[in-house]
Amino acid sequence: MSNQREQVNQIDQSFSAYVKRQFKKNKRALYSLYLVIFLGLVAIFADFIANDKPLICKYKGSTMMPIFKSYAVSAGLANWPEDLQNISWNELDYDWAIFPPVPYLPTNQDMINGHYIGPTGDQKWDKRKWLNSKRDETAVGPQKLPTRYWHWLGTDQLGRDVLSGMIHATRIAFLVGFISMGLASIIGIFVGALAGYFGDERLKISRGRMFMNILGLFFAFFYGFSQRSYILGDALEVSIGSFLTQVLVCFVIFFLVLALFNLIAYALKLVPWFKDKIAVPMDMIVSRVIEVMVSVPILFLLITVVALVPPHIFWVMLVIGLVSWTGMARLIRAELLKVRSLEYIEAAHAMGFSEWRTMFKHAIPNALSPVFIAIAFGVAGAILTEATLSFLGIGVSADTITWGKLLNMSRQHPLAWWLAIFPGFAIFILVTAFNLIGEGLSDALDPRLKN
């Protein structure tokens, strides 16, 4: 048995090494991966690249790191002192301070440089209103903006820095792409696996359990999510930490209610009619659901659903994930229709493994190759979908800056070319990079190209 496991591990390692070699041969895909990694680092460290708070400073004799402190405040774990609430961090008289390269948040308004000042425009500042103003009493009236506070990509109508908005919008783009596709992958892989592995005959459950699970899903969703929708909305307004905590509570309630109905199903087995097992046509049910989902225009469905919920980027991620799983479900279903009849699946059955263990441990892991390709293309599609919704002014709160929203601002002032060129180019580059990565994975995972 140990020798067989070693052979399987060697096969897996050799296949992984082969995929890496094939992927590296595709220079466009490799450079696209490097670009995505770079932009991913920009997204992760956006608060340390563009922020009005110092990275580290000494204020009134105390050394502190305000950006890290803001994370704790957002999570509801700490509070700002009274003298640091609702203040402009650039106006404080520090003993010393180290600021990020871009000293603005996307929401900071520079009223002197409002009304669409371009990157090469005449940018002014009033030194009396800025950092260390008390040390320079000679500054009178607006002067030329120093290089340190220059708006390198211009400003919008309200004087918000476009470069800061571009940097923080990178995080939004990656969050939308990966979270929505993560949700779509979980749903698509599970649903597609049920259809492909069990088909219409292999999944058999008792009438009582099937009836109680159908009824339990309805009540679990009602008490877990529908009844708590206002609590979720209020938590989302407080902080991300509070929202995630309430989501966890919703899932706990959901599974507790479902478990309660399964306990009732065991009691129903005392009745002979409820005890009899019947085949559940999973393949037919999933195929019909996919056909219905595909027949509905996704963009119109997204606009309709997003318009019914409070404007927030997390609802956009959730909705995109809930409507984007059909492609992955089809892929995993087609793969498992082939995999389920292979020898190692029959060997697992002969060893007495349950159907569920065989499916999750042996069948699904060997059918995921095309899903990885679909995820790469799906991330690009999710980013483009979010940009489209933001461009239409749907689903995103007023204080959230995204690439699509910057494009929307350019419609109000066509001469503000920087509001169209920079976000449009960013969307094009990131979407193209993910598409090239998907193309590279498709070639690398194709056994027909193996030498």
Image: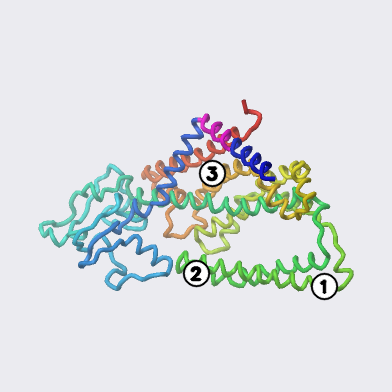
* Residue topped by disc 2: 235
Farthest residue, direction right: 272
Q: Which image quadrant is residue 368 in?
A: top right
* Residue topped by disc 1: 268
Q: Which image quadrant is residue 264 in?
A: bottom right
Query: Residue 337: x percent and y percent?
Result: 76, 44
Q: Which residues are magenta?
A: 16-26
Q: Secondary structure at mark 3?
A: helix
Q: Earlier in the sequence, mark 1 or mark 3?
A: 1
* Residue topped by disc 3: 380
Horizontal arrangement in the rendering, residue 186 relative to residue 160 (left or right): right
Q: Earlier in the sequence, mark 1 or mark 2?
A: 2
Q: What amino acid type is highlighted by mark number 2?
A: Ala
Farthest residue, direction left: 138
Horizontal arrangement in the rendering, residue 172 relative to residue 445 (left or right): left
Residue at the location (25% across, 63% down)? 63
Residue at the location (68% across, 50% down)? 361
- Badge 3: how crowded within 10 Å, few (<14), some, or many (20+)? many
Q: Nearer the viewer, residue 258 or 313?
A: 258
Q: Nearer the viewer, residue 118 or 284?
A: 284
Farthest residue, direction top: 451
Q: Are marks 1 and 2 in contact (CB under 8 Å)?
A: no
Horizontal arrangement in the rendering, residue 201 relative to residue 191 (left or right): right
